[in-house]
Amino acid sequence: MTAPDDERALPLPAAWARSAPARALRTTVHRALLGPYVCARARPAVEGAEHLAGLTTPVVFVANHASHLDTPLILAVLPQPVASRLAVGAAADYFFRSPLTGAATALFFNAFPVRRGTPGRTGGRHRDRVVRGTARRLLEEGWHVLLFPEGTRSRDGRLGAFGTGAARLCLRTGASAVPVALTGTHAVMPCGARLPVRGAPPVSVRFGRPIGAAPGESASDFRDRMREGVHALRRSA
């Protein structure tokens, strides 16, 4: 498989992680080891999975981000047909800063590298272009995509501002967005922790109904609706 142009420009092309052998190994690791471990430590309560039962086209999952636990947790609780076709946007400057770390991230999470920046500044606009370029190709190939529009982990567990990259991706491709609300992951594995801590309260994962952009809707307006969708799910926790 050929890596997309903007994916090749980043430190480690990750398209090989979507090959059949890599997918088979990743599925085995998640089913036998990582998924059971994460669920045992986080004890997640899952709601809204029924909204994913009728997915017939690729979607963009947009989730809040407070912990390195977020991605493996989402993969662990998603229905298997969806999880097996999910690609994850991961920060190039953190997860792909070395060949070994990048290879492990790509292999075990089907991650593709994206550059981070501050929304509204040059770096943020560049990040949005990279996210849209790689993720658009993945959607065209039939993959669901998971993005964290906050761009980084929340230091206190509160919901931060969203960038417009995910919204622009949906507008450009016609893909729907699925809000994902995570609560409690910050307590289980806060910033700086290498492993989940013991004794933390159970977490919750809530999937909302897929939402599409309205005709003529701007990226900023759709971004705000996506954020409100995540916020509403968190309020219901």
Image (spheres, grey):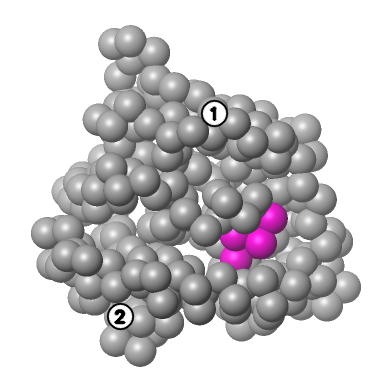
Quarter assignment of residue 48: top right
Residue identified by numbered label 1: 210
Q: Secondary structure at mark 2?
A: loop
Asked whether 32 or 156 is in front, the reply is 32
Asked whether 197 or 217 is in front, the reply is 217
One can see residue 162 in this view: no
Magenta span:
72-77
- Give the CA separation, mark 2 to mark 1: 33 Å
Q: Residue at x 29, y 86 (%)?
A: 99
Is label 2 in contact with label 1 (beta carbons under 8 Å)? no
Quarter assignment of residue 212: top left
User: Of the residues under marks 2 and 1, which one precedes in the sequence?
Assistant: 2
Q: Residue at x 83, y 67 (%)?
A: 200
- Left or right: residue 234 compared with residue 70: right
Q: Secondary structure at mark 1?
A: loop
Mark 2 or mark 1, which is nearer to you? 1
The secondary structure making up most of the magenta span is helix
Q: Residue at x 23, y 72 (%)?
A: 13
76 drawn magenta: yes
Query: Which mark, residue 97?
Result: 2
- Left or right: residue 203 compared with residue 33: right
- Left or right: residue 234 compared with residue 175: right
Asked whether 73 or 227 is in front, the reply is 73
Query: Which mark, residue 70?
Result: none
- Count of number-bearing discs: 2
Q: Residue at x 77, y 33 (%)?
A: 236
Q: Mark 2, residues whose alpha carbon is within 10 Å: few (<14), some, or many (≥20)?
A: some
